Structures are given as structure tokens and as C-alpha cells.
Amino acid sequence: MERDSEKTRTRILEAVGGLLARKGFAGMGVNAIARASGVDKVLIYRYFGGLRELLREYAARGGFWPTIAELAGKPLAALGDPVDFAAALLAGHLRELRRRPITQEIMRWELHERNELTDELARFREQQGIEILGLAPGGFEADGTRDPVAAAALIQAGLTYLVLRAKTADVYLGIDLRDEAGWGRLTRAAEGLVRAYLKGVPS
Amino acid sequence: MERDSEKTRTRILEAVGGLLARKGFAGMGVNAIARASGVDKVLIYRYFGGLRELLREYAARGGFWPTIAELAGKPLAALGDPVDFAAALLAGHLRELRRRPITQEIMRWELHERNELTDELARFREQQGIEILGLAPGGFEADGTRDPVAAAALIQAGLTYLVLRAKTADVYLGIDLRDEAGWGRLTRAAEGLVRAYLKGVPS
DNA sequence: TGACAGAGTCACCAGGTGGTGACAATGTCC
DNA sequence: GGACATTGTCACCACCTGGTGACTCTGTCA
């Protein structure tokens, strides 16, 4: 064997990512990681301490969350109107989440397990989300009739759910999740909803 | 022992429900069901054939999906306006899903496993959803600027995601998911969104 | 009373999991 | 060269899983 501990470490970490993308968190175990990386599992314990710590280190490397710039898709300065801002970020959320199977897998995992790691990952996202809201030109304060934050949360959550659902479903309320046309409808609906809600004029 | 096969069958089926509510599908196995029901696992094979068939039979008993009447919350005849109709059904979706932990667990399961059973369960819901859309007074046809079905799907998906997420998260984009006030904000936002989108006037 | 089918019990199997101790190979430094 | 720590290999452990064969018990019916 190669006898290069640093290389072995990264091989293990890469195996985590690959396994995550292929099998999700269901098949995530010491034996599976050892098999996938072609490394003896005892090295996982030696180098990382255990599965928890390995996953923690994998998470610490990051790279599966889109940055704010990626979410916006264009320079933030170009989004002077709060409605454009919201529409662009929601579209960006959909776009960026769809192209990140590992991120999707983490979010699926968060949906039915809660531990220090999932809490930390969620906290990071939550923090980023709040930060983005703070960047909204003019802010997103609620008044008597409108609650822009709740509305944005709802639409973002809807897009998230549909992306996660698309792995195991072909269709949702008649909308084809396998086809790009279906996603186009959803993108336009999201934009139309937020425009109508914030300005009172659909589309 | 009691020597009553019918009683034993129902004890097993009830154990499935209890286990589902407590542990979700993660801990769903022959041994666990046998333990939870206080019945030898060999009887599961004798009476049902295996885990798949047992789950199938459990699903066939139904009772975890809200009916259309429950979703509407009030007589459909009272919902003459398509906007009221949509708002009432979205609010009903949230209300009914929140009170059904087993249904939530099934939907979580559907999110990362796909088999004949999940497909069938999803097909039932899909069918019901389409049926509800058909009941909308005046229909929900898309025109050049609006796609009411996509908008409703998005909001419904958002409510679904937040309900599922509430089990493992306390907060989403600053909205408190443990508190009734948070759900009130979301309900009002959903209604405001659909009203604004369909009529052009928020709230 | 005795035969018999149905209901329930028990012991076991192969295979997988997380986890560890003992050992062999390899490079490094004196 | 020899000492030594590091890296990697292998065999093993207890435990749990799904699944099955063989047994005993019990109620029913002739």
C-alpha cells in the first residue's frame, strides 16, 4: 500500500461524499465507507476517531452550500428593487439546490435525524438566510397586511420540498418534476407569487 | 397466551402504527414490530407473509390521509369563490397534516425511498389532489400570466416541508416552528400569497 | 376420549454492523 | 546497521438483523 496518511485521509473523505451522493445517509456506515474508499476501517477510527467525527470533518470542509453570490446569480447591486431581489434569490435557491445532490441528501437527512451535526449545518443555513434577508433593499419588514419573510420562507420551503421530492416522485399535483418545463412553471409561479404579494400585481 | 389469531393480527398492525409514530420508518423491522407488539416474529411471517405485505396491509387500512371534507374544513358549497376555496384548502392541508404524525412519517419516508408501496401511497394523494383541483369553482386554468396550479402546488409543498421540518428544527428563516404564532404567520402568508396571486390584491 | 389443525414458543441460521487488539510492513533518524 | 514510530492488514468480538424449522400447547369436533 501507499503508506501516505494524508492521501488516505482524503480518500476516506472523498468516499463519504461519493457515498452520500449515491446512497444518501441510509447507507452511511463505517464498513460502507471503508469499502468505498478501499481502506481498512480501522484507519477511520485511527484518523478521525469514529463516524461522528469523520462526518463532522467532512462537513467542516464545506462546499455543498451555495454562497450568497451564487444564490443571487448576478451582482447584488443589480437587484435594487426588493421584488427583483426576492425573485432572483428564490430562483437561485431552486437552481443551486437542484445541482447539488449532496446538499439535497443532507437536507433529507436533517428531516429525520437531529443531532449536533445536523443542528450545526442547519444553524449555518439559518444564519445565511437571515443575512440574505438583511440584504434586501428596503428590508422585508412586515406591516399590517403583509409578512414578506413568512411568504419568502413558504415559497423557499416549497421549492426545497419539490427538489427533494423529485428524487422519488415523477409528478406533484400534475406538475412534471422530471421535465424542465415543470420546473419552469414552478419558477415562474414563485416569481409571480412574490411579485403579486409584494407589489399587488401578478407577473 | 391468548390464542386468538385475529387479535394477534390487529396487535401487530397496531404496533406498526405505534412504531411509525414513535420511531418513523428508520426503526421499522420485523424484530422491532415483534418486540413492540409482544408477539413472536414468526407470526408476522405466518399471518402476513413478510414485512412488505404487512406494511401493505397496514397501508390498506388507511385512515392517515385527511379526506377532502376534512381538508376543506367547511362545506364545499360555502366556498363559492375560487380564492376562498384555495385559501381554505391550503389552511386545511396545514392543519390536517400537523395533527397526523403518522402521515408525516410516511411523507418523510417517501422522500428517500421509492418502492411499490410508496408509489401507491403517493399515487393516491396525487389523485386526490387532482380531484380537489377539479372541484375549484371556475377551475384553475392557467392563462398567459398566471398558473394557479403551480402556485398552489408550491405553497402546499412549502407547508408540507415546514411541517416535516418542524420535527427536527425549531426555526426556519426566523419563523418559530415550535410556536403557534409562527404557524399563524405562515397560514396568513399562504392565504395572502394565494389571494394576491389570484386576485391581484394582497390580504 | 382421542385425533387434529391452528396458535404460539424456542432455538437456530447466515450475514451484516460497529468496534478493537495484535501483528506485519515501511519509512526515518541516530 | 539498528531502534522506533507510523501505516496498513487481518482476525476477531458482541450484537443485531431477517428468516426458518421444529417443537409444544390448546381448543374443537367426531
Image (cartoon, coloured by chain):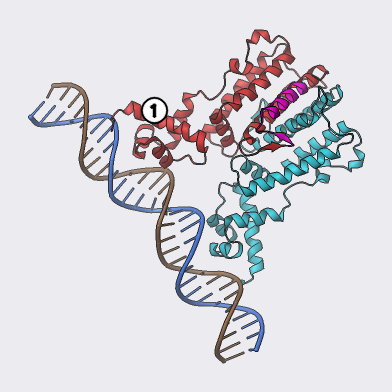
Chain colours: A cyan, B red, C blue, D brown
Left or right, A27 with reference to A128: left
Can residue A179 be seen?
no
Give the residue displayed 64% in from the left and 63% down from the top: A9
Q: In the image, is residue A67 part of the stretch drawn in magenta?
A: no
Q: Residues within 10 Å of mark 1 (few under 14, many from 20)?
A: few
Determine the residue positioned at 60% across, 26% down: B97
Magenta span dominant secondary structure: helix
Q: Amino acid at mark 1?
A: Thr
Q: Position of residue D16 (x, y in %)?
A: 43, 48
Q: Nearer the viewer, residue A155 or B2?
A: B2
- The image shows residue D27 at horizontal and vertical percentages of 22, 26
Apparent side of residue A169 relative to residue A78 in the rendered image (left or right): left
Mark 1 chain: B
Q: Could you say which is closer to the camera, residue B8 or residue A31?
A: B8
Position above or below: B199 against B158? above
Q: Quadrant of residue B142?
A: top right
Q: For mark 1, what is the residue? A: B10
Give the magenta part as a residue range: B173-193
> Quadrant of the image for the C terminus of chain A?
top right
Residue A109 location, x and y as percent?
Answer: 61, 43
Q: Is residue B174 magenta?
A: yes
Which x, y percent locates residue D3?
Answer: 56, 86
